[in-house]
């Protein structure tokens, strides 16, 4: 029999064994494949769960909140850096335009003088500067023109102006706030002054040396001007106060901004210096009287 089968039976036996072994291995592999197939969806589920979870976590991230906080801080910083709107302070124009104009009184001038000298002089020296009621002329009640007011407060003017013979001096001094107001007041007093000489005392277009020469040339009875130029003339001895009898302050007049002479800081300071330069002492000695027009 061995001869009938020949040598091929060895190969068939080997192949059969190999085939059996292969079948066994395939059978062993099949269940593993099934298990793998079954486990794959589970893995997918786990993967999908893992991929979904981070998405939910992304929503909970703090980066957008930090951005919002930083934006809020930036807006707060911008608000802090922006200048705050200041409330508009009421100007003198607003106050005076809303109030009715009141005529000035000697008490108003006295209060201004005491406030100015409160830091410069002692209490005793301030009391010496207090003006008596006899040192004032009657005040304007806002019904007079300058000519009618001067006629009222200077009833003996014709006699006084005839007795005046000193050069570089005046009998009547009218103090106002500006050069234009000076010209206007000189025009208004034509009915009062008559042929009496009046001189303009202001700095605009006229040098102080020229004004000193004009005062030295002839006799001048009335001087009308600004407190700054009048004070400068007194300091340079270009204008003497020896013959002075009356000082009229353009107290009640208001400019386009509703300001009086004492409401303008520069004019107010020059006016107080003028009073300090000798007018207050002359009033105290009852040589000069002050009127508020």
Image (cartoon, rainbow, N blue to C red):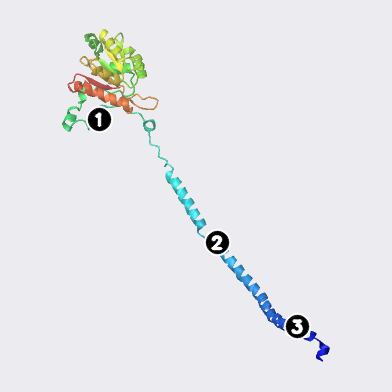
Q: Is residue 79 left or right of residue 23?
A: left
Q: Which mark is residue 116?
A: 1
Image quadrant holding the C terminus, namely top left
Q: Are marks 1 and 3 in contact (CB under 8 Å)?
A: no
Residue 39: name its quadrant. Answer: bottom right
For image coordinates 28% across by 26% down, the residue present is: 269
Locate the N terminus and report the quarter of the image it occupies: bottom right
Report the front residue among 12 and 258: 12
Q: Residues within 10 Å of mark 2 (few under 14, many from 20)?
A: few
> In front: mark 1 or mark 2?
2
Q: Earlier in the sequence, mark 3 or mark 2?
A: 3
The answer for how far apart the CA atoms under marks 3 and 2 are is: 61 Å
Residue 218 in sight here: no
Residue sitting at x 50%, y 56%: 65
Quarter where residue 201 is shown: top left
From this viewpoint, which residue is outermost toward the bottom?
A: 1
The circle on residue 15 is 3
Is there any visible trace of residue 274 in the rendered image?
yes
Task: Determine whether the residue tagged by mark 2 lies in a helix, strand or loop.
Answer: helix
Q: x%, y% of residue 15? A: 75, 83
Q: Could you classify mark 3 by the number of other residues whose Cα lies within 10 Å: few (under 14), some (14-19), or many (20 or more)?
A: few
Marks 3/2 in contact by CB < 8 Å: the verdict is no
**The disc label shown at residue 146, or none:** none
- Toward the viewer: 193 or 125? 125
Q: Return the residue nearer the eye: 96 or 26.
A: 26
Q: Which mark is residue 58?
A: 2
């Amino acid at each position: 029999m061995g001869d009938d089968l020949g040598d091929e039976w060895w190969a068939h036996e080997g192949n059969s064994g190999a085939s059996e072994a292969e079948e066994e291995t395939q059978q062993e592999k099949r269940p593993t494949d099934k298990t793998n197939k079954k486990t794959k969806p589970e893995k997918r589920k786990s993967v999908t769960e893992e991929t979904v979870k981070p998405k939910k976590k992304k929503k909970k991230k703090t980066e957008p909140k930090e951005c919002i906080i930083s934006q809020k801080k930036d807006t707060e910083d911008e608000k802090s850096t922006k200048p705050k709107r200041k409330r508009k302070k009421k100007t003198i124009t607003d106050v005076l335009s809303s109030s009715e104009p009141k005529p000035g009184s000697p008490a108003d001038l006295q209060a201004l003088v005491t406030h100015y000298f409160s830091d410069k002089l002692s209490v005793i020296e301030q009391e010496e500067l207090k003006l008596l009621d006899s040192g004032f002329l009657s005040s304007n009640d806002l019904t007079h023109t300058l000519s009618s007011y001067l006629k009222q407060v200077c009833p003996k003017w014709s006699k006084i102006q005839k007795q005046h013979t000193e050069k570089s001096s005046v009998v009547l001094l009218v103090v106002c706030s500006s050069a234009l107001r000076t010209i206007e007041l000189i025009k208004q007093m034509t009915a009062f002054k008559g042929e009496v000489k009046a001189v303009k005392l202001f700095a605009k277009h006229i040098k102080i040396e020229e004004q000193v020469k004009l005062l030295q040339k002839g006799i001048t009875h009335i001087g009308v001007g600004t407190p700054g130029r009048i004070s400068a003339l007194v300091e340079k001895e270009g204008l003497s106060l020896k013959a002075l009898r009356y000082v009229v302050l353009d107290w009640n007049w208001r400019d386009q901004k509703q300001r009086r002479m004492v409401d303008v800081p520069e004019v107010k300071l020059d006016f107080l210096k003028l009073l300090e330069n000798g007018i207050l002492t002359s009033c105290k000695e009852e040589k000069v009287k002050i009127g508020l027009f």
